[in-house]
Amino acid sequence: MKAKSQIANETLRKSIHLLSSIVPFTYIYIPRDIEIVLLSIMFIMMLSVDIGRARSKAFRDFYDRFLGRILRHHETEAGGLSLTGGSYIVLAFLLCAVLFPKPLAITAMFIVIFCDSMAALYGILFGKIRIGKGKTLEGSLAFLFTGLIVVYLGPKITDSPGEFYIAALSVILTTIVELVPVKIDDNLVIPMFFGASYLLLLKIFIH
């Protein structure tokens, strides 16, 4: 019963996660400065909700009535401000738009949305080989293969055919980093590391 409940809750969480793909899709058509303003507003709104959860028991109870079952344990800890995965992913989107060239920012957003979702769902449904805390080999392979599809289809910074191999290597490195247990939320680590490694490798091998 607990396993079924876990699957249902994770499916709902990742369904909401996948809905955030509207951000990179719209960024394809929206100028960078407007995107940054919109994401800044979104993050302020998300942060305000998290502050409300931390400071008001009534607000927290109201929030938990609708979304409490999809929150991680660290997102519900009492005693201080704890950001939800939604807040972290909006912050990650904002940082991507600010720090990375537009094509890379879009790809990095898609990476965290699709790779993280597929890894979590595939790992829960089919994962058997444990390779870390809360991680499975099957989930990591789903992350890797999804990432390769994303970078194959995603926009590129240069016209060089070698850029795909740079992107693929960044996906491989990000898959490895995603396995490392860190206190920083995956929704922030994944796109930031992917984008930074992509730019570094691009500078080394192409530019």
Image (tube, rainbow, N blue to C red):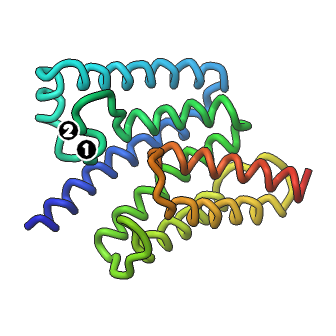
* Quadrant including the N terminus: bottom left
Q: Are marks 1 and 2 in contact (CB under 8 Å)?
A: yes
Residue visible at 51% across and 25% down in the picture: 39
Mark 1 → mark 2, Cα distance in angstroms: 7 Å
Which percent across, then down, holds residue 206?
89, 55
- The kind of residue tagged 1 is Leu
In terms of secondary structure, where does tag 1 sit? loop
In the image, 133: left or right of 113?
left
Q: In the image, what residue occupies the spot 12% across and 29% down? A: 61
Give neighbour class at mark 1: few <14, some 14-19, many 20+ (Cα, 10 Å). Answer: some
- Tell me what residue is drawn at x 42 percent, y 62 percent: 118
Residue 84, placed above or below residue 4:
above
Residue corresponding to mark 1: 71
Given residues 34 and 140, the one toward you in this image is: 140
Disc sitting over residue 67 in the figure:
2
Percent x, y of residue 9 = 21, 54
Q: Secondary structure at mark 2?
A: helix
Question: Can you say whether 72 is above or below 133 in the image?
Answer: above
- Residue at position x 78%, y 46% from top? 157
Q: Position of residue 161 (x, y in %)?
A: 84, 62
13 left or right, relative to 109: left
Residue placed most toward the observer, 58 or 191:
58
Amino acid beneath label 2: Leu
In depth, the one of 113 and 138 nearer the eye is 138
Q: Which mark is residue 175?
A: none
